[in-house]
Amino acid sequence: MIQVDDVERPATPAEQAMIDEIRSGTPPFPPAA
Amino acid sequence: MNKVGLWLVKTQTIGTAVSSIAVTNAFSADYQNYWVLVSGGAASTTVNLNLTLGATTTGYYYAGWNSSMVVDSLTASRAQNAASFVAAGTGTTSRIMANILLYSPFEAEETVAIYNNNISTTGGSSYALNGFLNNTTSYTDFTFTTSTGTVTGGTIYVYGIRD
């Protein structure tokens, strides 16, 4: 689900593609232990 | 009273199990610079909140560091022409947070972002990053996208900083 202001709804295919693109560039967290 | 320094422009409650939150009409000609604060809520797992402006998913440049709270590690983090300002906020199963200073998002010039936050767990980490968006687009909206999982609850506050 995505949210635009107060409206929550399923992502459209284009919106999901954008989310996937943004997520693909996220580096891993540094070591925890 | 001289001038009010911060003016609460918009408040947005985060919904239930959402992977992205778009906030519209946040920026305008009323203010040149903004402070975006996120607090409360929780994430489904440890997440980064990646920030994008408008519909732009390219041209984000940033540099800084992240460091573990558990082991001695200091990792440089940088990106060129990335799809977002990565880790502009963070989330754990206990809280969501973001502390972002945005310069000129509405102006027809490069937007600069300065942000720092942490993963507030005993095995967590700390971030300090800043960068810019390499275009001269005027923005009114922004979006937080989780690096994985979802977020529930919490509030996004957008403050205009008076000149």
Image (cartoon, coloured by chain):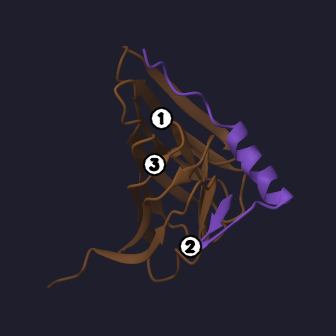
Indicate the colour of chain A: purple
Q: Secondary structure at mark 1?
A: strand
For the residues beneath circles 3 and 2, the answer to whether they share a chain is yes
Q: CA distance from mark 1 to mark 2?
A: 24 Å
- First in residue order: circle 1 vs circle 2: 1
- In the picture of the structure, the residue carrying the numbered disc 2 is B106
Q: Is residue A28 visible?
A: yes
**Dot in front, 3 or 1:** 3
Look at mark 1 in the image and give the residue it sits on. B64
**Which is nearer the eye, B39 or B89?**
B39
- Looking at the image, the residue that sits furthest to the front is B16
> Residue B7 at x, y = what percent?
34, 77
Q: Nearer the viewer, mark 3 or mark 2?
A: 3
Q: Colour of chain B?
A: brown
Nearer-N-terminus badge (3/2): 3
Instruction: Please report the residue visible at 63 percent of the width from the left and 65 percent of the height from the top.
Output: A3
Q: Secondary structure at mark 3?
A: strand
> Would you say B136 lies left or right of B158 here?
right
Mark 1 is surrounded, within 10 Å at the Cα level, by few (under 14), some (14 to 19) or many (20 or more) other residues, namely some
Q: Quadrant of residue B92?
A: top left
Q: What residue would you read off at disc 3?
A: B42
Q: Tell me the amino acid under the disc marked 3.
A: Ala
**Quarter of the image where the C terminus of chain B is located:** bottom left
